[in-house]
Image (cartoon, rainbow, N blue to C red):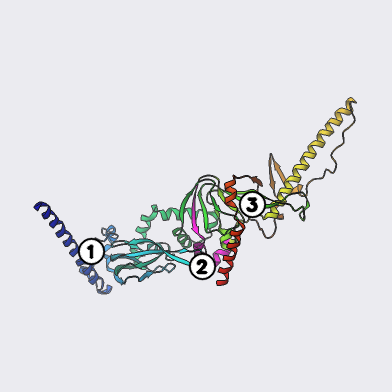
């Protein structure tokens, strides 16, 4: 029992000694860093370097030949509880290492109300932790807000000193970090190649990577997307639900109106392709649904962050490259053209067969000639239709698609698809839901 008490006393004594040493070092560092830079001599710089070399982040640089010079340019700044060190979106001008105390890191998160946001706490940093380097490394704006959780002493390096002493080493250290991997991927996305790197850095810090099983509905037709999606690996179907006008047409303006809901697979997206951006940047409801056709790894970024990070100049250029799909009438017209072409082809084949039979019958005087199919006329756009096996390609879409649907992508194939009842149910919003969404949208617009 006495031995246990002795051991406990030793541990307690060690802890007390460590605490005293810690407090002493902080107080000494505080006094040293208060000495103006121009008045710091060799001994003062060595004392700063000795204490700085024991701080978690700075100890990795203590064996560098220029570490003493670095320590000469450090200075101290104290923040009170709940005081902001910097706000999200500000220009980065300094790098921070926590000498004592702690800080909380927040990011702005969108709410269900347009243009309203809330702060979400994502991390708490303590003594020895460093922060603020991302905006300095990439010359971008602050990607998060940092607030003192208690009274805290921070060692500060200005951007100029950071660039001179730490930038190169820190960039090499980050080459294998997740941020650089994600940034490297975004730089290879074709539509992002017109965006400068500092903006892409901000985008990459707001991205999350998620895995979705097949048949997952990511965006429903008739809803405003909450996220923009970039396919890292996988495949996504673009589905259009249309009120199909059953019947036949003789021109683009003459359709027998008899509605029927049909789903059409109008596109298939793969790696490095982006979707949801058209509706987000134009602030409209999506006119198609997006569904994973295989298990997919997809990068997401909230609509709120997309609108906040991209400048108006970038948005205008970006909009010119956006993909837009044909509307209901164009799909209806394509369907009817395909139907008329198939009818024409069947009639043509039948008449060729009749010619052969008539010739055979005439030569052998066995029977009277059969009558050919009447009104054998080609479809409206036969010169614009190319056939290959069972697939029909509609070249005329580029010229004939309506002005409202200024398509940047030629639709290569129009395929009617079928889904199970659950998928169809998930795709279809009730009339009450749509009405509620429109009312809420009007209220939000009126408020601003």
Answer left or right for 170 relative to 55: right
Q: Residues within 10 Å of mark 2 (few under 14, many from 20)?
A: few
Please identify, in this view, whether the residue under mark 1 or under mark 2 is nearer the observer: 2
Q: Quadrant of the C terminus?
A: bottom right
Q: State the image coordinates of residue 65 (x, y, percent, origin top left).
A: 27, 60
Q: Quadrant of residue 92?
A: bottom left
Q: Residue 391 location, x and y as percent?
A: 68, 42
Evaluate whether residue 44 shows in this view: no
Q: Are marks 1 and 3 in contact (CB under 8 Å)?
A: no
Specify the farthest residue to the front.
432
> Residue 259 appears at what percent x and percent y?
71, 52
| Residue at image mark 2 | 115
Q: For the magenta stretch, what is the residue range?
A: 296-318
Residue on which the image places disc 3: 241
Of labels 1 and 2, earlier in sequence is 1
Give left or right: position of 163 versus 337. left
The reply to whether callout 3 and callout 2 are in contact (CB within 8 Å) is: no
* Nearer the observer, 423 or 179: 423
């Amino acid at each position: 029992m006495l031995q246990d008490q002795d051991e406990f006393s030793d541990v307690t004594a060690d802890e007390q000694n460590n605490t005293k040493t810690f407090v002493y070092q902080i107080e000494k560092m505080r006094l040293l860093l208060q000495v103006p830079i121009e008045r710091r001599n060799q001994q003062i710089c060595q004392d700063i370097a000795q204490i700085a070399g024991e701080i978690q982040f700075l100890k990795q640089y203590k064996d560098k030949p220029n570490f003493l010079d670095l320590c000469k340019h450090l200075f101290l700044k104290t923040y009170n509880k709940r005081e902001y060190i910097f706000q999200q979106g500000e220009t980065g001008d300094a790098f921070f290492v926590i000498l004592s105390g702690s800080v909380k890191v927040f990011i702005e998160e969108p709410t269900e109300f347009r243009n309203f946001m809330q702060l979400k706490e994502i991390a708490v940093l303590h003594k020895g932790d460093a922060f603020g380097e991302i905006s300095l490394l990439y010359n971008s704006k602050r990607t998060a807000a940092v607030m003192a959780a208690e009274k805290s002493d921070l060692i500060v390096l200005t951007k100029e000193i950071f660039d001179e002493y730490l930038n190169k080493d820190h960039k090499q250290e980050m080459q294998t970090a997740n941020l650089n991997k994600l940034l490297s991927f975004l730089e290879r996305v074709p539509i992002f190649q017109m965006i400068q790197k500092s903006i892409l850095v901000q985008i990459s810090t707001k991205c999350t990577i998620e895995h979705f099983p097949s048949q997952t509905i990511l965006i429903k037709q008739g809803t405003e997307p909450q996220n923009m999606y970039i396919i890292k690996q996988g495949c996504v179907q673009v589905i259009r639900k249309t009120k199909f006008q059953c019947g036949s047409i003789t021109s683009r303006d003459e359709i027998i109106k008899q509605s029927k809901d049909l789903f059409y697979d109008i596109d298939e997206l793969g790696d490095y392709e982006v979707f949801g951006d058209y509706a987000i940047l134009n602030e409209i409801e999506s006119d198609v649904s997006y569904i994973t056709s295989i298990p997919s790894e997809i990068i997401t970024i909230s609509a709120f962050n997309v609108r906040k990070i991209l400048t108006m100049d970038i948005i205008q250029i970006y909009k010119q490259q956006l993909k837009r799909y044909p509307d209901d009438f164009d799909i209806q017209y394509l369907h009817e053209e395909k139907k008329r072409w198939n009818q024409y082809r069947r009639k043509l084949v039948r008449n060729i067969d009749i010619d052969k039979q008539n010739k055979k019958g005439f030569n052998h005087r066995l029977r009277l000639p059969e009558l050919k199919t009447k009104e054998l006329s080609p479809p409206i756009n036969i010169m614009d239709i190319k056939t290959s096996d069972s697939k029909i390609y509609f070249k005329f879409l580029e010229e004939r698609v309506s002005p409202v649907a200024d398509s940047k992508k030629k639709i290569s194939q129009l395929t009617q698809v079928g889904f199970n009842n659950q998928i169809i149910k998930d795709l279809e919003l009730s009339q009450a839901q749509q009405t509620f969404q429109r009312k809420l949208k009007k209220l939000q617009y009126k408020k601003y």
